[in-house]
Image (cartoon, helix red, strand yellow):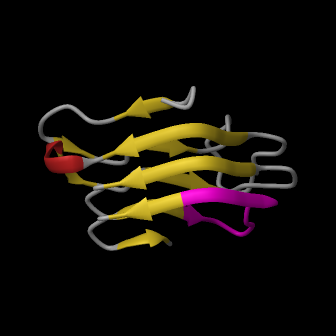
Amino acid sequence: SGGGTRIGPTAGFDGDIIASTNLLGIDSEFQHGGGIFDLQVVGGANQVGGSGIHIKDTGELFSIDRVVASGCYEHGIHIEGASTPTYIGYISTHANGTGGVF
C-alpha cells in the first residue's frame, strides 16, 4: 500500500536485511547523493541476527525518507560511519530487538 516496497527475510536469515555501503567497499569513501525511500522492512521471526537497514558512510545529500522498519532482530535502522545523512524524514521504527534508530 502507498506505492512503497516491502522487504523481509527468509527463514533463519542471520544478517542485515539491507546493507548499504559505498561502491568501492573502502571505509574512507562516502556515499553522496543517494538515499533510501518508500520502503518497509519487516524482520519478524525469520530474522535471527542483524538490523533491518544498515547504512554505512553517508555523505552530502544522502537521504532517508518514508521508511518503516519493524520487527528486526537488532536495530530497525543502524547508521554507522563518520557522517550522517543530510535528511531523515518520515521514518517509523517499532518492535525492534535492540532499538529503533542507532
Bounds of the magenta segment: 79-91
38 relative to 59, above or below: above
92 relative to 64, above or below: below
Taking the view exactly as shown, the residue that stands out farthest to the front is: 1
Report which quarter residue 58 is drawn in: bottom right
Q: Measured from the top left, where is residue 12 in percent x and y?
A: 12, 40
Q: Measured from the top left, where is residue 74 in percent x and y?
A: 31, 64
84 relative to 38, above or below: below
* Residue drawn at the location 16% of the way across and 42% of the way down: 46
Q: Measured from the top left, where is residue 79 in percent x and y?
A: 57, 63
Q: Is residue 46 left or right of residue 30?
A: left
* Residue drawn at the location 49% of the way across and 53% of the way down: 54
89 relative to 47, above or below: below
Report which quarter residue 82 is drawn in: bottom right
On whether residue 23 falls in the magenta region, the answer is no
Q: Is residue 94 left or right of residue 10?
A: right
Q: Is residue 42 left or right of residue 64?
A: left
On whether residue 82 falls in the magenta region, the answer is yes
* Residue drawn at the location 41% of the way across and 43% of the way down: 41
Report which quarter residue 28 is drawn in: bottom right
- Count of numbered tags: 0
Q: Looking at the picture, tell me which residue is in the foreground, 41 or 92.
A: 92
Q: Measured from the top left, where is residue 69 in percent x and y?
A: 43, 53
* Residue drawn at the location 50% of the way across and 59% of the way down: 92
